Image (cartoon, grey):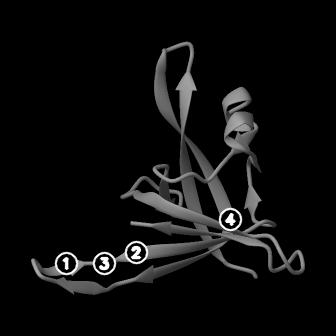
Amino acid sequence: MKGNGICTVFNRVYDPIYRKYILQPTVIEGVFWQEETAARNTKEGLHEANEVRIFIPFRAKCQRSFGTLEELQKNPTAHFTLLPEDKIMHGISLGASLTIVSVSTFDYGGKGLQHWEVVAK
């Protein structure tokens, strides 16, 4: 899998100096960004069901390495992670961010196929 898109992941990290949570950005190159526009008809009426699927290869180029939540908390400058409720944005520039809803790991097959599938709204 090879993508040509760029995304920015914002992890929520506690800053002990300022004693508050901050959003730490990580730019990832080589992702595949797929937007889906849909609507859902319910008893209450028509509702938006738009979502974005981002496919992030394990081989994607980024400034930090992927780690667990514990690794991120111990060393936030070296790691990033993908968690529900974190923010993700298309591109690098400051714009509208989306909230990650779910993350699926596909770590089987060849190295070229291994990736994370992120669903965001």
Mark 1 element type = strand
- Report the residue at 9% width, 77% height from top: 44
Give how far apart the Cα atoms at labels 4 and 3 are: 27 Å
Give how far apart the Cα atoms at labels 1 and 3 are: 6 Å
Picture layout, residue 22 above or below residue 46: above
Depth check: 49 or 16 in front?
Answer: 49
Mark 2 element type = strand
Work out which quarter of the rendered image holds the N terminus and state it.
bottom right
- Which residue lies under the disc numbered 2? 51
Dot 4 amino acid type = Glu
- Which residue lies under the disc numbered 4? 29
Task: Locate residue 117 relative to residue 91 in the image: left or right.
Answer: right
* Marks 1 and 3 in Cβ contact (< 8 Å): yes
- Which residue lies under the disc numbered 1? 47
Picture layout, residue 68 above or below residue 58: above
Depth check: 80 or 25 in front?
Answer: 80
